[in-house]
Amino acid sequence: MITLNRKTPKEKYNLDLNIRYVKCMHHSGYLNDDFHMNKHDFYEINFCKSSDILFTLGKDTLYLTNGDILIIPPNTNHHFTSSEMVSNYFDIYTLWISNDYFEILMNKFDEINHINFSFQFPSILHTADSALEFGIDFPSLYKISDTYGSLSEAYLCGAILCLLVKIASFATSCTKAITELQPELINEIIAYIDEHFTDNISLEDLSIKYHISKSCLNSLFQKKLRISCYQYIRKKRLAESVRLIRAGVPFKQVASQVGFNDYSSFYRAFKNTYKISPAECLAQKSEDISIETLD
């Protein structure tokens, strides 16, 4: 258990973030200063057994109280926030699940990916009025982590799946008890693509750079923009190609400048998207035509 109180300087907060599969922690005490966790490359699920505290997630400041479950996917900035508006007391159980193991579970039990709730986006579940006893589940998992010695982690791995199903079931049946938060990660990835879309970037490159699976990456884009990551990159490249064509840049040079490996691939993508050829685009540059671009 980690106890943070008004007499403990934050420099002494020393957490082991080496997660092989799962880890369960218990945090309690009073917060005297902001407690920064920042980003990490694993999933985090917090249960507030007894809390009156503010929590900063991305650009959102949230109030956490008894029974709240806070879900934080990988690569999301977050930290506890000290404030005179609340007592700053917290009694929180935290589960850390490695990204690799989480993806194994999601891929093995595909049904979880087809419900009206996703662990891939930050959210708060308000369970205080629920008949489901999450207040028992999380402390039990914490006890398990010290009960079976070298087998404790193996036991936790099995128990985690049961808990994820229970959380997903609650989320789908009590949609009014969920507060979905704007993922900061997708904004960061979009900003990176906007700056580098003419480079030779791929879905694989982005997956490695941001420590997220390709399926999760596409899910983020589908939820925010209703297109895949690949489609977004292609739209950015083609929109830029329209500008270059109308500026008089030779077609083959346009193709290479916006990131296509060869002119034939560029031509097909351009024609399929805009229903006209690059030459027709150039010919119509002075006319009032409608060619889709992506701001």
Image (cartoon, rainbow, N blue to C red):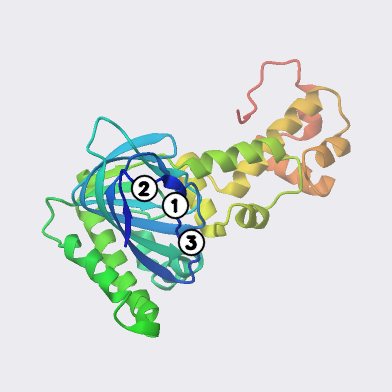
Mark 2 vs mark 3, CA separation in Å: 20 Å
Residue 59: quadrant of the picture: top left
Q: Secondary structure at mark 3?
A: loop
Is residue 147 depicted above or below 189 in this figure? below
Quarter of the rendering occupied by the C terminus:
top right
Residue 275 visible in the picture: no
Task: Tell me how far mark 2 sits from mark 1, CA to CA.
Answer: 7 Å
User: Can you name the residue that lies furthest to the front here?
Assistant: 7
Mark nearer the N terminus (2 vs 3): 2
| Crowd tier of the residue under label 2, counting other residues whose Cα lies within 10 Å: few below 14, some 14–19, many 20 or above | some
**Relative image position of residue 219 (x, y in whole percent):** 48, 52
Name the residue that disc number 3 marks. Answer: 17
Query: Circles 2 and 3: CB distance less than 8 Å?
Result: no
Distance of label 3 from label 1 (alpha carbons): 15 Å
What amino acid type is highlighted by mark number 2?
A: Thr
Residue occupied by mark 2:
8
Q: Can you identify the residue that label 1 sits on?
A: 12
- Coordinates of residue 172 in the picture (x, y in percent): 25, 55
In this view, 105 is above or below 49: below
Is 36 left, or right, of 244 in this rendering?
left
In the drawing, does residue 71 fall left or right of residue 52? right
Kindly tell me whether residue 201 is visible in this rendering: yes
